[in-house]
Image (tube, rainbow, N blue to C red):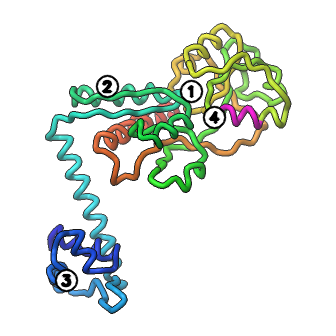
Amino acid sequence: MNIEQLEYIVEVAKCNSLTKAAELHNITQSGISLSITALEKELGLKIFERSRRGVFPTEEGKKIINKALEALNKIQEIKDEAYFQTNLMNGEIKIEGIPGFMPSIIRTITFLKGKYPNLNIEITEKGSFEIIEDFRQNKIDAGFIAVRYDALQGDIGIAFEPLFEGKMVVCINKNSPLAKGGKIHPLELKKQTFILYNDDYVNWFMKDFTEKFGDVHVLFKTNNARSIEEALTEGLALTIGHDYSFLNYPPVLSGDFVILEVDPFPQEPVYFGWVKTESDKLSLISKQVIHLFNQEFKINSNNETS
């Protein structure tokens, strides 16, 4: 048994044709047929049934093909790991993320830059739908977004890797009389002054809220997170955002700002994760960044809940 034989049976199973599989692997049809026959003889079972309609796996063959696919994936993982261990990585990657994304990604980038000093990485903070649009225009390699899971369905070539489920929450200065209790009633929330990050999901939340409870006073909208932080510090207003955005937010961690749930107010779940190309088209650099970021995020999440 060898790697080529595993590749052959996987490819034949995909296209149900010895001829097409042979063309893809630059081998003659008789060559690929003899190779598969030799594997069948070695294993003592028939992997394919050949007929005029094509070549189709037997029931026993389906199990062998699944195992072969698992083995080939593991082999590719070994090759990827060897690449990172033995090569000084050169290249560049552009990544965008929603607010709250930066602390974890900065730690990830710091680690990678220490290991691969010639690697160039550009990171930018934007709203979810801006990130999706930049991705569609091939301006970035990957983006960390908040999205309804069904929102990307039907976008050919776009894959979404959810990391966790979240919701919209209120962030307010600790000195506000509303800061105690961990919750705020919608009718009380309606009376407040808002400063909002200009994100589609924040806008949708506010649209839904005002349709149910009436207009609210919005002081301003911005994509400058620092401006929102300064306004909250001064007690001028409160803000609405994804709960993920505040997970590692320093003023929340220090206790200067407090997070409140809007209750009762049912929300459609929002999923946080990566928008990226299909996995087999994703660059090794991008895979490494996403993998390390996910590890960093899980560590932080466990610390939050412990």
**Distance between mark 1 and mark 4 Cα atoms:** 17 Å
**Distance between mark 4 and mark 3 Cα atoms:** 55 Å
Q: Is label 1 in a helix, a strand or a loop? A: helix
Q: Residue furthest bottom?
A: 52
Q: Which disc number belongs to residue 33?
A: 3
Q: Residue furthest front?
A: 137
Q: Which disc number belongs to residue 7?
A: none
Q: Look at label 1 and name its amino acid.
A: Phe
**Distance between mark 1 and mark 3 Cα atoms:** 58 Å
Of labels 1 and 4, the one closer to you: 4
**Tag 1 residue:** 246
**Distance between mark 1 and mark 2 Cα atoms:** 21 Å
Residue 192, by quadrant, is: top right
Q: Is label 4 in a helix, a strand or a loop? A: helix
Q: Which disc number belongs to residue 200?
A: 4
First in sequence: mark 1 vs mark 2: 2
At a point 15% along the width and 39% down the height, the residue shown is 87
At a point 16% along the width and 74% down the height, the residue shown is 27
Q: Is label 2 in a helix, a strand or a loop? A: helix
**Tag 2 residue:** 110
First in sequence: mark 4 vs mark 2: 2
Task: Estimate the x, y position of residue 28 in percent, counting from the top left.
Answer: 16, 78
Q: Is label 3 in a helix, a strand or a loop? A: helix
First in sequence: mark 4 vs mark 3: 3
Query: In this image, 189 relative to 165: left or right?
Result: right
At a point 40% along the width and 52% down the height, the residue shown is 278
First in sequence: mark 3 vs mark 2: 3
Q: What stretch is highlighted in magenta?
A: 201-208
Task: Estimate the x, y position of residue 22 in percent, counting from the top left.
Answer: 22, 75
First in sequence: mark 1 vs mark 4: 4
Other residues around mark 1 within 10 Å, as few (<14) / some (14–19) / many (≥20): many
